[in-house]
């Protein structure tokens, strides 16, 4: 785990900030390209996650900074796993993040016709052949890093026979998986990707756009670079795993009559502590009910972060700060949370909410009297103004803010102790009421009526200031305290025979009913974010009903995990 080094090493603002931007700046200066064209190429087989956000901010960010353009291209070459739901969510999430592809929305499936025509070109040139080996056999023939592969027995087929077989594959004459089209490159190549890679496989699956028109589908490596070429992409930016695929990417570009020659550049993917980012695992969590859906507020998906109360500004700031490098590393999730706090601190209005209410009766405050107290909406932003909160004889404070028999360092309320109620009065605890089980049921207090607004004419200043809500005016709410979904720093590391799910945090959701909110929160809509004073940032959830809001905890005010970890050491 590291704090991102790139942040510290970034050159002065205004110029290139990483090797990708340096390359683009150089290519524009030298006239190699007149405009930069990038693309973000998601496969519509899941929702976007925070790792994708890094790639999105890089591709769209570079295009914007250099006045080029960025295409959104769905890499929809695998119909068995792809769905329209994902196509829709991906567009929604990219827009939410603040990016716009203008008219440049494309689908690899739009190019199926052209890709197929080029495949015939390769066959005619003797650069591709139809192979009858099964997938397992292809793998067995491929060899290893230390052993060369063996040629397929079908490698020597003539161009005419290959063309005939390829057309019959396309026409649906052969069963799924029975044949493939392979490039004829070099079975002894040190790079395994160059050992006659598969270009087409037979697969009968209804495609979300082309329906049943095709029963052969191009492989990623074949489709991707040629899609880049068709669209005139100048800088095809992908993650480091594709570095070893670059020679193949270039082989296709060199051996096909493409209209344009794109180049591939690789950067390190984002990894985050306490987070799984593999789409397979995220799908597993959703399909097997470990979370409530792709937008469960604990998911590292953009839909999950949005519902949790993350802002696009915070995620973009995070993407910028972690930077772009060639070295794989894992970023501390606390860093993302800090970016969020920085943003919410500036914009989130402050409100009072009591999550675990304890009733307080002010003995010397007149029955039936209600005063409207002025409270500051945001100490960080004077323009946010003030609001009124009603104050009365019966209030709620946080149960945690009272201790009958406090230890030395507890400065909040206890018998005989005076505290300040935020923006209201000083109160002193004079008595404790208990229920039959001996639990504290209510407190009796006196209020010093000379301290209205929260200061005393004699200069007295209590050590603690508590938040409060008037009992008769409170809005009842459900509050969902979300925490990290995994309790292990590296959730992928699991003991023998178990998987990453053993690392799920059993306390990642604690739902509290009967929380008391100040009345200004009666009208709130899904997505509204506030700071509950002293507790954290919270966001109104879409499960809210009129008069019955539901709030999600977005993030605590401080990083409590860091403290726990330090204590553990
Ligand atoms: P898979 O291909 O296994 O389904 P993927 O995460 O690569 O998963 P894609 O939809 O292909 O999913 O990703 C779209 C783009 O996002 C790719 O260019 C990929 O390199 C980039 N990307 C994916 N994960 C990350 C990550 N963790 N950090 C940065 N970029 C990522
Ligand atoms: Mg991928």
Image (cartoon, rainbow, N blue to C red):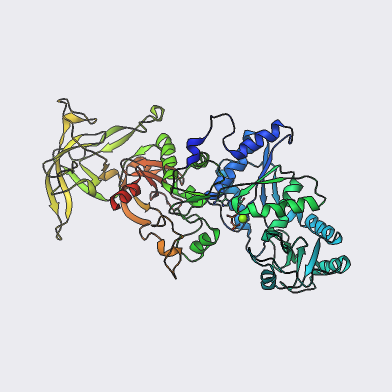
Whether residue 77 is visible here, answered yes or no, is no
Q: Nearer the viewer, residue 551 or 319?
A: 319
Q: Is residue 210 above or below residue 137?
A: above
Which of the 4 image quarters holds residue 391?
top left
Q: Nearer the viewer, residue 147 or 360?
A: 147
Q: Is residue 507 above or below residue 17?
A: below
Image label count: 0
Image coords of residue 290 (percent x, y):
45, 63
Say which residue appears at 51% left-offset and 52% top-offset. 301
Whether residue 424 is visible here, answered yes or no, is yes
Image coords of residue 423 (percent x, y):
26, 33
Say which residue appears at 73% left-offset and 57% top-offset. 222
Query: Horizontally, is 491 left or right of 423 in the view?
Result: right
Image coords of residue 453 (percent x, y):
24, 30
Q: Residue furthest right?
A: 160
Say which residue appears at 57% left-offset and 57% top-offset. 46
Quadrant of the picture in which ligand 2 is shown: bottom right
Say which residue appears at 79% left-offset and 57% top-offset. 113
Image coords of residue 28 (percent x, y):
70, 33
Q: Residue furthest front?
A: 146
Q: Is residue 332 above or below residue 499?
A: above
């Amino acid at each position: 785990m590291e704090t991102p080094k790139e942040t510290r090493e970034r050159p002065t603002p205004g110029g290139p900030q990483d090797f990708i931007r340096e390359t683009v700046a150089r290519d524009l200066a030298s006239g190699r390209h007149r405009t930069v064209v990038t693309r973000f190429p998601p496969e519509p087989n899941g929702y976007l996650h925070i790792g994708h956000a890094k790639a999105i901010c890089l591709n769209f960010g570079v295009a914007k900074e250099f006045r080029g353009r960025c295409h959104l291209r769905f890499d929809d070459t695998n119909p068995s796993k792809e769905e329209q739901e994902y196509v829709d969510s991906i567009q929604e999430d990219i827009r939410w993040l603040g990016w716009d592809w203008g008219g440049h929305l494309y689908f690899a499936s739009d190019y199926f016709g052209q890709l197929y025509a080029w495949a015939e070109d390769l066959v005619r040139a003797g650069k591709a052949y139809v192979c009858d080996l099964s997938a397992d056999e292809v793998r067995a023939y491929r060899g290893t890093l230390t052993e060369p592969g063996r040629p397929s027995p079908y490698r020597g087929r003539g161009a005419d026979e290959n063309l005939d077989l390829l057309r019959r594959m396309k026409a649906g004459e052969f069963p799924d998986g029975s044949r493939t089209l392979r490039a004829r490159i070099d079975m002894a190549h040190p790079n395994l990707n160059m050992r006659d890679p598969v270009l087409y496989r037979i697969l009968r699956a209804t495609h979300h756009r082309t329906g049943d028109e095709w029963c052969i589908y191009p492989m990623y490596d074949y489709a991707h670079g040629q899609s880049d070429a068709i669209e005139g992409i100048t800088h095809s930016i992908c993650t480091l795993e594709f570095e070893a695929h670059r020679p193949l990417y270039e082989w296709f570009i060199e051996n096909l009559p493409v209209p344009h020659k794109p180049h591939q550049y690789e950067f390190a993917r984002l990894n985050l502590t306490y987070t799984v980012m593999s789409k397979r695992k995220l799908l597993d969590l959703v399909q097997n009910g470990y979370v409530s859906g792709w937008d469960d507020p604990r998911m590292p998906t953009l839909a999950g972060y949005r519902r949790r109360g993350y802002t696009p500004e915070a995620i973009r700031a995070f993407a910028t700060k972690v930077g772009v490098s060639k070295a794989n590393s894992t970023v501390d999730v606390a860093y993302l949370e800090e970016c969020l706090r920085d943003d919410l601190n500036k914009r989130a209005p402050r409100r009072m909410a009591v999550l675990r209410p304890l009733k307080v009766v002010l003995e010397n405050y007149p029955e039936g009297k209600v005063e409207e107290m002025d409270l500051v909406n945001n100490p960080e932003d004077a323009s946010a103004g003030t609001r009124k909160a009603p104050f009365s004889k019966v209030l709620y404070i946080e149960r945690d803010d009272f201790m009958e028999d406090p230890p030395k360092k507890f400065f909040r309320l206890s018998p005989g102790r005076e505290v300040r109620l935020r923006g209201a009065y000083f109160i002193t605890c004079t008595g404790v009421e208990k229920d039959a089980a001996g639990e504290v049921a209510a407190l009796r207090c006196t209020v010093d009526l000379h301290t209205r607004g929260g200061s005393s004419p004699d200069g007295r200043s209590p050590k603690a200031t508590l938040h409060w809500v008037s009992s008769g005016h409170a809005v009842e709410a459900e509050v969902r305290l979300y925490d990290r979904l995994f309790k292990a720093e590296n959730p992928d590391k699991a003991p023998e025979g178990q998987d990453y799910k053993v690392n799920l945090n059993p306390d990642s959701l604690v739902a509290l009913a009967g929380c008391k909110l100040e009345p200004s929160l009666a009208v709130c809509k899904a997505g509204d974010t506030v700071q509950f004073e002293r507790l954290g940032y919270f966001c109104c959830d879409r499960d809210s009903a009129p008069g019955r809001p539901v709030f999600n905890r977005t993030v605590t005010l401080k990083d409590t995990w860091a403290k726990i970890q330090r204590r553990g050491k």
